[in-house]
Amino acid sequence: MLRAVTYWISAAFGGSSGHGRASDSVLVRVGVSYRSDPDQVVAVLGRVAGDCALLRKQPAPAVAFEDFGPSALEFSVRGQALRAEQATAAASDLRTRILKAFRAAGIEIPVAQHDIHLRDLDAVRTILGRIAEERAARPSAGAESRARPASNLSDTPRRETG
């Protein structure tokens, strides 16, 4: 009974009791470069979330430094959409605003990087050597190949007409 009354009072005054209203929740996660200043990131995210017209001002959106990820410092912005049917639009708007604000502030969103470990370097050397030999054996890419359209480039000689 108390839960229902709390929900009714909260809903009547435009708030959210947290009971059964998960559909208006907005969560945006973003990773930034390890070179970024976490305080600057939190400030930018807080400003952007506060300026988002599709998010409630009370309770204010929350920004958190979530974790040290494998390729990025991970942050989140949590808020509530003005209306449940605007939650997706609010998240999209927030992501767009974050990207633009990060670009303006020089904060980088990193692209995941992967290390490749080559186990058979002799095979790699053999293949690269073969490719180098094939390229060296081809006639030089002089004026003739520059004059041809790219669709006609092949190993077969081209007949000249005219």
Image (cartoon, grey):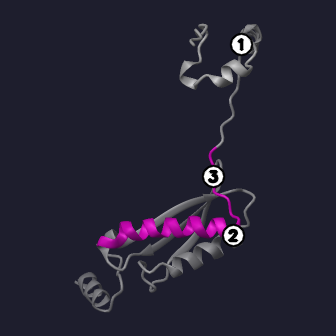
What amino acid is found at the position of numbered circle 1 in the picture?
Ile
Q: Observer-nearest residue: 52 or 64?
A: 52
101 vs 127, left or right, is left
Q: Observer-nearest residue: 94 or 142?
A: 142
Tell me the number on the disc at residue 69.
3
Residue 157: percent from the left, percent from the top? 61, 7
Q: Nearer the viewer, mark 2 or mark 1?
A: 1
**Disc 3/disc 2 C-alpha distance (Å):** 21 Å
Find disc 1 in the rendering and name its residue. Answer: 131
25 vs 147, left or right, is left
6 vs 51, left or right, is left
Nearest to N terminus: mark 3 or mark 2: 3
- Magenta range is 85-112
- Tell me what residue is drawn at x 69 percent, y 18 percent: 144
Above/below status of 70 relative to 28: above
> In which quarter of the view is residue 108 placed?
bottom right
Find disc 2 in the rendering and name its residue. Answer: 105
Does the CB distance between marks 1 and 3 fall below 8 Å? no
Above/below status of 4 relative to 44: below
Q: Observer-nearest residue: 75 or 10?
A: 75
Mark 2 element type = helix
- Tell me what residue is drawn at x 57 percent, y 64 percent: 99
Nearest to N terminus: mark 1 or mark 3: 3
Res 21 visible: no
Q: What quarter of the picture does the C terminus occupy? A: top right
Above/below status of 148 relative to 52: above
- Tell me what residue is drawn at x 32 percent, y 88 percent: 10
> In which quarter of the view is residue 133 placed?
top right
